[in-house]
């Protein structure tokens, strides 16, 4: 796990990021090796003190380039981020092999949860069966 800090090169001393009641983007550049992914997560101290939460934040394996930390101000007050302030934490996860997507004509819908998500399948027919994809590791053969 790594804490993400506002670096002086990203936010010069003469400039402050002002976060109003909108989303604010903070940009960083990283390189992720194949098989590694990361998740951007809230810092509890930032949420409880400044009411700033991270929106989104999944970084794909093998990604190289700019990472945008999207913060949302939940308070009614303007919040300031200064150089050196903690803004988020990045949780690095080794995933191993990148999954290979395999097209299928249908999927088994033998779970109570189903395939539509958000609890929407309970007692309902699977409407997306013909458009489904299944994920298998790159070692799987069909």
Image: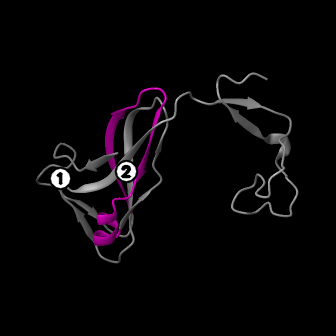
Q: Secondary structure at mark 1?
A: loop
- Span of residues in magenta: 23-51
Name which residue lies at 17% across and 53% down.
83
Q: Position of residue 47 (x, y in %)?
A: 34, 67
Name which residue lies at 52% across and 29% down.
96
Residue 133, which numbered label?
none
Label 2 vs label 1: CA separation?
Answer: 15 Å
> Looking at the image, do the residues carrying marks 2 and 1 touch, with CB atoms under 8 Å apart?
no
Q: Position of residue 46 (x, y in %)?
A: 30, 64
Name which residue lies at 64% across and 24% down.
138
Count numbered badges in the picture: 2
Residue designated by label 2: 69
Tell which residue pokes out farthest to the right in this image: 125
Q: Secondary structure at mark 2?
A: strand
Q: Position of residue 141 (x, y in %)?
A: 75, 21
Which is more toward the observer, 50 or 97? 97
Residue designated by label 1: 84
- In the image, residue 64 sits, relative to residue 47, either above or below, namely above
């Amino acid at each position: 796990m790594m804490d993400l800090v506002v670096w002086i090169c990203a936010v010069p001393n003469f400039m402050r990021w002002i976060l109003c009641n909108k989303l604010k983007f903070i940009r960083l550049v990283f390189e992720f090796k194949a098989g590694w992914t990361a998740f951007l997560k809230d810092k509890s101290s930032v949420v409880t003190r400044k009411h700033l939460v991270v929106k989104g934040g999944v970084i794909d394996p093998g990604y190289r380039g700019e990472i945008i930390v999207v913060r949302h101000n939940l308070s009614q007050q303007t919040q300031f981020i200064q150089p050196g302030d903690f803004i988020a934490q990045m949780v690095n996860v080794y995933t191993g092999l990148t999954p290979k997507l395999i097209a299928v004509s249908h999927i088994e819908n033998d779970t109570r949860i189903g395939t539509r998500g958000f609890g929407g399948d309970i007692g309902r027919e699977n409407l997306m069966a013909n458009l489904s994809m299944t994920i298998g590791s790159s070692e799987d053969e069909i």
